[in-house]
Every structure is written in structure tokens, then in C-alpha cells.
Image (cartoon, grey):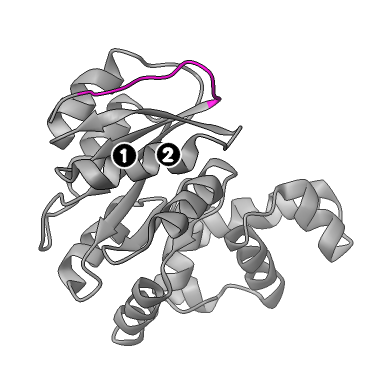
Amino acid sequence: MELVLESVYRVLPVWVITTNAGLSHEIEAGLSDIALLKFGGTFGTWQSAFAHIKDRQSQEGQILLADEIGNGRSAFNWVTIIKETVPTVSVIAVLDESDSEAIESALKVGVSGFLARTSPVSQIVSALITTATGGIALSPSVMNKIIGIGAGRNLSNSSQNVTKREVDILRLLADGRSVKEIADKLSISYYTVDTHIRNLHRKLRVKNSRGLITVAMRRRLI
């Protein structure tokens, strides 16, 4: 299925990759009253979505909801290809929560949200809003699976060096709080929070806040 609709009245476009026309229409309807988002269109494959998005690059963010992409350890490798060309894209993975390899694939490339295929449309729309405001969206069932994956691994030395204050900041980041909001919440300066976040980037070897949250959950830091 190729592009079916594009609107120009909202702020962040949401592109949906799915072969389920009913799901696409339900998401479009669910976004109709959300001022922060607009329904961009539907694609049948990630390749067709990529071809369209890369021709419409902008400084604004874009959200790609990926449903029915595939299974296994390479299920989300394509996300890296898209992000290298269009870094403003945030990807929400809709996956089978019993597929540990697909979840690990999504974790590896740093997707911005993890939803179970059984998620209702209301939860999907909520996840899109969370992602648009800088948070990371997680279905409870997928979160439990991620925790289980992390529990089966040894933590790296860099994870063990994360301080209690840094864990507090990670938890607030996971709640979608901005640096200013975290500073206010913890009664510390904006610059102190920024320094802690920079240190976390170094310790956990990631480049952005979404990556911090993903790694922190995988290693059971939060």
C-alpha cells in the first residue's frame, strides 16, 4: 500500500508502515484531534516510506510507526539506514512481545518506542504523543520482556559506575521530562543536569536521551 493521505494542518507528521488498512484508518482518526501531530500517510514497506521521507527532509521531527515489519534479530536493522539519512525521524516499533530477537534488534538501533501488536489504538496514539514530546513509549508487556532480557546479561563496568543522582535523572528522562523540568524537580541547576546527562552519554556509550533510556532499561538501571 502506498501513500494514501497527507495533511498540512498539524505540527509533526506521523507516517505509518503497515499492510493493515483498518489500523491505518483508526490511527488517522485518533490523531484528528491531536494538535501536536498530523497523520502523514501509509506505506506498505519501509523502503517506500524511506523513499518518500528522504525527499521531504526538514529540521522538524517526524515519527514513523512501524507495524508488521518482520521478526528476528535483523527485524529493525533498516532503522539505521533511515536515521543516517533522515536523523529527525523517530521510530516506534510495533512488534510481537514474545519475539526476543526482534526486541533486541529494536533496542540495538535505538527506536523511540516499543508497542505490542495487541496494543489498542488509544495506546498507540498515546505513544505517539509521548514520542513527540521527547519521551520513550513502552507497552507494559514489552517493558517486562526488555527487563527480562537485561536480567539475563551481565552489566558492564560503565553501567555499574552510574550514580544515584544519574539514575534519578534517567528516570525523569524516561518520564518525558525536559532538562529544565528535571532541574526544577531535583532542585539543581540546568547546567548540573546537562553535565550529568553528558556523563551518562559517555558511561553508557550513547549519543542521545532516547538511547540513554533504552540502554538504562535494558541494563535494569531504571
Instruction: From the viewer's side, name the closer residue of 25 and 183.
Output: 25
* Type of amino acid under label 1: His
Extreme residue in the right direction: 187
**What residue sits 63% from the left and 72% below the top?**
167
Q: Is residue 83 above or below residue 222?
A: above
Indicate the quadrant containing the C terminus: top left, top right, bottom left or bottom right: bottom right
Quarter-wise, where is residue 82 in the image? top left
In the rendered image, residue 163, in percent from the top left (x then y), is placed at 65, 74
In the rendered image, residue 2, in percent from the top left (x then y), is placed at 15, 25
In the rendered image, residue 154, in percent from the top left (x then y), is placed at 34, 84
**What residue sits 25% from the left and 42% below the top?**
79
Instruction: From the viewer's side, name the closer residue of 165 and 83.
Output: 83
Q: Which residue is mark 1?
A: 25
Please give left or right for residue 183 compared with residue 140 in the image: right
Please give left or right for residue 11 compared with residue 147 in the image: right
| One can see residue 205 in this view | no
Q: Which residue is mark 2?
A: 29
In the rendered image, residue 185, in percent from the top left (x then y), is placed at 83, 62
Q: Is residue 180 above or below residue 10?
A: below
* Type of amino acid under label 2: Ala
Instruction: From the viewer's side, name the closer residue of 59 and 130.
Output: 130
Q: Is residue 34 above or below residue 182?
A: above
Residue 10 within the magenta-colored segment of the rendering: yes
**What residue sits 39% from the left and 55% below the top?**
121
Extreme residue in the top direction: 55
- Marks 2 and 1: in contact by CB < 8 Å? yes
Residue 189 within the magenta-colored segment of the rendering: no
Spatial CA span between label 1 and label 2: 6 Å
In terms of secondary structure, where does tag 2 sit? Answer: helix
Which span is picked out in magenta?
3-11
